[in-house]
Image (tube, coloured by chain):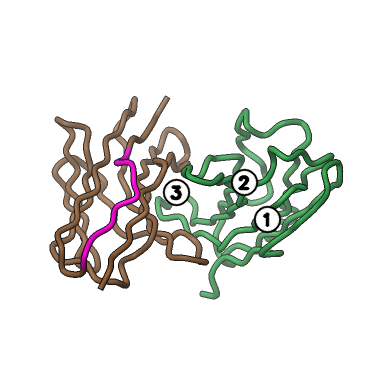
């Protein structure tokens, strides 16, 4: 069990640029979740996948956000035309199908200047 | 919708002091309840959980009891250590919501020697 990996750990970008984050879940985990955490707040759910299917998206996930999980393995989260309000920690988690325990990665800290 | 309210921080204690972090929840179903911990620079880790009323979760000297009558899941530890300094998140999940976690805002605990 190598854990959930996220890349990059930190990303600084200028407003209006596009950014993409990657998450590698624990290999046998069917479910993959994306969360966003801002300073002083708990993580907020963005979206989740079961294998390659994206089954739910939060209303927090505007049209500028898109997530994919091709082949049901790693996942990417892309933010287009970034805004300063997108600055946050983006967390990925994975779990077994029907499992309550989520395993979290260390997150990608995004700063939009 | 589901929500979690936890004690505002920060909390500062001396080593060997008693810790309580309050957590209450609102849920439409019968959720499972969790405490996650986030050490500096690391991802969230599951600390303990309880899946039904009157269950007690425990780990590393921490305990929390699922109290349905008061919709609470308070975290306690009899004697904290400097190494317990971290942010603690109360959370719930429900099968009907596909085990998405709903988090509280987090409580920063600092333990001084």
Q: Is residue A83 magenta?
A: no
Q: Colour of chain B?
A: brown
Q: Which mark is residue A49?
A: 2
Q: Which residues are magenta?
A: B6-14
Dot 2 surroundings within 10 Å: few (below 14), some, or many (20 or more)?
Answer: many
Q: Which mark is residue A72?
A: 1
SS category of the residue bearing label 3? loop
- Residue hosting label 3: A98
Q: Is residue B13 magenta?
A: yes
SS category of the residue bearing label 2? strand
First in sequence: mark 1 vs mark 3: 1
The image quadrant that residue B5 belongs to is top left
Label 3 marks a residue whose chain is A
- Per the model, the C-alpha gap separating discs 1 and 3 is 16 Å
Q: Nearer the viewer, residue A94 or B78?
A: B78
Q: Nearer the viewer, residue A109 or B14?
A: B14
**Residue A89, x across and y down, in percent:** 60, 51
First in sequence: mark 2 vs mark 3: 2
**Residue B25, x across and y down, in percent:** 30, 33
Circles 2 and 3 on the same chain: yes
Residues at discs 1 and 3 in contact (Cβ within 8 Å): no
Residues at discs 2 and 1 in contact (Cβ within 8 Å): yes
**Residue B79, x across and y down, in percent:** 15, 66
Q: Which mark is residue B25?
A: none
Residue at 60% in and 44% down? A48
First in sequence: mark 2 vs mark 1: 2
């Amino acid at each position: 069990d190598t854990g959930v990996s996220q890349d990059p750990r930190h990303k600084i970008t200028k407003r209006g640029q596009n950014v993409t984050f990657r998450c590698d879940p624990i290999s046998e985990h069917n479910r993959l979740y994306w969360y966003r955490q801002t300073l002083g707040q708990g993580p907020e759910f963005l979206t989740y996948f079961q294998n390659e299917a994206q089954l739910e998206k939060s209303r927090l996930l505007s049209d500028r956000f898109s997530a994919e999980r091709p082949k049901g393995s790693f996942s990417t989260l892309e933010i287009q035309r970034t805004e300063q309000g997108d600055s946050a920690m983006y967390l990925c988690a994975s779990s077994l199908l029907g499992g309550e325990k989520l395993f979290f990665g260390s997150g990608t800290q995004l700063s939009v200047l | 919708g589901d929500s979690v309210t936890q004690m505002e921080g920060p909390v500062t204690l001396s080593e060997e002091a008693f810790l309580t972090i309050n957590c209450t929840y609102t849920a439409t179903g019968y959720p499972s309840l969790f405490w996650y911990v986030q050490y500096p620079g690391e991802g969230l880790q599951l600390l303990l959980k309880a899946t039904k009323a009157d269950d007690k979760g425990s780990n590393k000297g921490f305990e929390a009891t699922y109290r349905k009558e008061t919709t609470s899941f308070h975290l306690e530890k009899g004697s904290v250590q400097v190494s317990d300094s971290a942010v603690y998140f109360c959370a719930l999940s429900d099968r009907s919501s596909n085990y998405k976690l709903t988090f509280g805002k987090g409580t920063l605990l600092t333990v001084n020697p």
